[in-house]
Image (cartoon, rainbow, N blue to C red):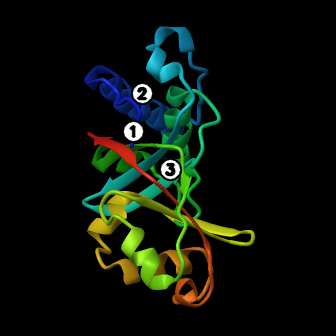
Amino acid sequence: MMPETLSQDDQTILLKLARQRMTLAVREKKRLILDLQTYSPMLQQPGASFVTLTIEDGLRGCIGALEAYQPLVEDVVEHAIGAALEDYRFLPVSPNELDRIKIEISRLTQPQPLSYTDSRDLIARLHPGQDGVILKDGVRRATFLPQVWEKLPDPEQFLGNLCEKMGAPYNLWQHKPLQVLIYQVEEFHE
């Protein structure tokens, strides 16, 4: 569970800052340094986030971190710019797309290992709609945010698609024990 949720003001600040810095990077190819002291203590604390960009409900970019390694405000700005310019699945966002893009921010809890005995037990232990899931198999890993359950509500499909995202066979999770971690998010959007 999320230890402490962000205030409405902090959420608004993060969304405005993500929009402002993404726009600046796309239009002028500039990245500015943040003055951390101007933000609330919650935004200065280490935090892990994903920033998702959509156009008319279609994914346009999504970049994030699974573990906190920098202040949350810096993490959000870095991933807003990354989602616009560095998501390998898409061409960089062009200036003429900026007005159509919607921004969603997901602040993650610390991922926790999920122990399970077999594929049926794994499905029984997952909480669709609540759990973000990380699958690891050696050096390969992939994650789906909890919001992905809306598009893939069946746990078998969810895990199969996550295996494919990791570059593994669809049914690997049914035949081989994988390292599984779960996390929750505080999600907010424009």
Q: Are marks 1 and 3 in contact (CB under 8 Å)?
A: no
Q: Position of residue 73 (x, y in %)?
A: 50, 27
Horizontally, residue 65 falls left or right of residue 60, namely right
Up the image or down, 88 lies above or below 177; here it is above
**Label 2, label 1: how many angstroms apart (C-alpha)?**
22 Å
Helix, strand or loop at mark 3: helix
Mark 1 Cα shell of 10 Å, populated few (<14), some (14-19), many (≥20): few
Q: Position of residue 80 (x, y in %)?
A: 48, 41
Quarter-of-image position of residue 134: bottom right
Amino acid under disc 3:
Ala
Please tell me which of labels 2 and 3 falls first in the chain.
2
x 48%, y 63%: residue? 133
- Considering depth in this image, is 43 or 60 the residue closer to the camera? 43
Amino acid under disc 1:
Met
**Label 2, label 3: how many angstroms apart (C-alpha)?**
14 Å
Q: Position of residue 94 (x, y in %)?
A: 45, 50
- Considering depth in this image, is 30 or 117 the residue closer to the camera? 117
Amino acid under disc 2:
Leu
Helix, strand or loop at mark 2: helix
Residue topped by disc 1 = 2
Residue topped by disc 2 = 17
Horizontally, residue 6 falls left or right of residue 170, namely left
Residue 83: which numbered mark, if any?
Answer: 3
Q: Are marks 2 and 1 in contact (CB under 8 Å)?
A: no
Please tell me which of labels 2 and 1 falls first in the chain.
1
Viewport quadrant of the C terminus? top left
